[in-house]
Image: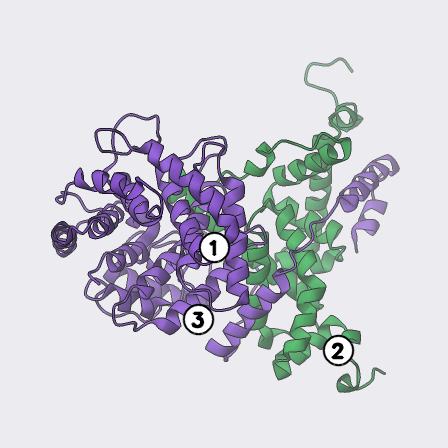
Chain colours: A green, B purple
Amino acid sequence: MSPPMDSVPLGQMNDADLMLRVRGHDDEAAFALLVARHQKILLNFFARSGVQYDSEDLVQQTFLRLYRYRQRYVATAKFTTFLFLLARQVWIDELRRRQRRERLAESLAAEPHEEFAAPADPSAGAQGDLDLARALAALPEGLRQVVELAVYQDLPYAEVAGILGIPVGTVKSRMFNALAKLRALLEPEATAAAPHQGPAKGDRP
Amino acid sequence: MNLNAHLSELPAAEAAAFRTLVARLQAAPQREPSPQLASRILAAVASERTRNPKPETRNPKPETRNPKPGTRNPPPWQWAAALAAALLAAVTLFNRPAVPLPAAPLPADPAADPAAWLAACQEADGAWQPARHGGDPAYRPALTALAALALARDPADRFREGVRRATDALVALQTADGAFGGEGRVRAYNQAIAAYALATLAPHGPATAAALERAVAFSRAGQSAEGGWDYEAGSEGNTAVTAWQVRALAAAAERGVGQANIPLRKGLRWLRGAARSEGGVAYHRGSAGRSESLSALAAYTLMTSGRSFEGLPALGRNLTAALSAADGAADCYRDYAKVMAFESAGDTARAEAVRTGMRHRRQAGAQDPWEPIGGTLYTCAFTALAARQ
């Protein structure tokens, strides 16, 4: 049995209890703790989506939505599931904004991979990180989000399915395809030699 | 099921390869939030709490499709918002973005009192939302800055509180590096205009003063060796961005921001070098042709931001003398620059002639060339900035 919530110091409360305090009492300190705990996770969520300069703006928008929608939070849902649901909606709005911008002003259009034009760090490690970022950015959005939630956030497939609004089976197939594509991008030699592609048309048996 | 269980179902060799890949992904370094991020978020939430204490009770439903504009099925509450937005668009605007936004209360005629219209459009967080008014949301910082400058210029000082809130909003929009959001060209545009607004609107606290220092540091870092600024890296500069940056640095220097002095001198030197003997300025120093808008903007900048430097105000007056007071097509940016140049040169008659032309074109319903990007916020802000004091 857990102790009554009010007798537990805020810093020791789990995310769900903090969120319930935000929902029930508009508790600023509880909200500040949630921000402190999750701002980095969200920042990297957006950064891995290919956003370089606006990531912190998107984190702010996500927390604003969290505050606006606080009455909809129910303790049966894991807090991070709720948070990533909101973050994903912020990201979808951002994608729409970019698409509109490209339509509206071609001369001012954003270059989605502009950040990769910057000179790379000559060290091998930095180049490796750059390759990873490139490979992730090259994934179709549906696959990349599955990787984000299941690999980086370590969420169970059922939660990933809930956030993305797709069946668990689709999460599995997307994850497999995402990993296969990433491997092909990052390790082309290994995948070129892989036998699973089968014989080409016209090859002898 | 989780990722580990999933991989266990695969053939051993494939699972091992994927596990190595997953470990590599998870080991990649992560970005650290800027020290100001948490306080920015909490300030934005505090503002939301003050302005809109009633929480949203609608359900943030998960998206079930890939994001394709105009192809999703919004939940019922969004249909209501879309209907409201569509009705508003039918009355006032075309080119409204696909995402519906709740309609904001607006005065009937933005042309009658553009500053009052802007004040009525200010959002709860102190910024302006271009998407509500036919503009591109990427330019929210710059349009917020322009609207705030327009409110601050009101002769009756009706919008002091709105200016203060807008300044706070600009501080909240600023990123750790001193920019104000956006990427590439959008970022350069937002930063130059927002920095000018921050420097011009009186810093009313340590947070605003610190934001101004960061903005100036960003400007310094982006200045070319020749002293100019441009949207593109590697360019020596273009007149438009350089003029706004010089104005920002001059205003910051007047507020005691010491690091603004050296880039200000270099920027003014660049602008002086852009002026041609025949009395015009082009977009780039080396390009052919002459821009009436940029000649006016450069003239105004030299007369005001360069007023402490020998020869620059006289150069600005010479450039102003070559400007025309009569123009055919609508262009609020050009008209604003001309009004400011003529007023700075003491030529109130020609300043008034430009204002008259603006008014006639507006009454005739002429479309401003920048409206598809800046929307009504942009045209109203420049109209208010060009209004008689």
Is the residue at mark 1 from the same chain as the one at mark 2? no
Q: Please, what is the three-letter code of the amino acid marked with disc 1? A: Arg
Q: Nearer the viewer, residue B6 or B37?
A: B37
Between the C-alphas of marks 3 and 1, the distance is 28 Å
Viewer-nearest of discs 3 and 1: 3
Residue denoted by label 1: B72
**Residue sitting at the far right:** B12
Residue B275 screen position, x and y as percent: 29, 33
Residue holding disc 3 = B124
Residue A61 in the image, given as x and y percentages of width and height:
55, 62
Q: Chain under label 2?
A: A
Q: Residue at x 73, y 40 (%)?
A: A179
In the figure, is residue B331 to the left or right of B179?
left
Secondary structure state at the residue bearing disc 1: loop
Q: Which mark is residue B364?
A: none
Residue at the spot of label 2 = A10
Please determine if labels 3 and 1 lie on a single subunit: yes
**Rendered location of residue B177, percent (x, y):** 57, 50
Q: Residue at x 33, y 59 (%)?
A: B133
Label 3 SS: loop
Chain of the residue on which disc 1 is drawn: B
Residue B196 in view, yes or no: yes
Discs 3, 2 touching: Cβ within 8 Å: no
| Quadrant of image for the N terminus of chain B | bottom right
Disc 2 residue crowd, few under 14, some 14–19, many 20+, Cα 10 Å: some
Q: Position of residue B105 (x, y in %)?
A: 32, 71
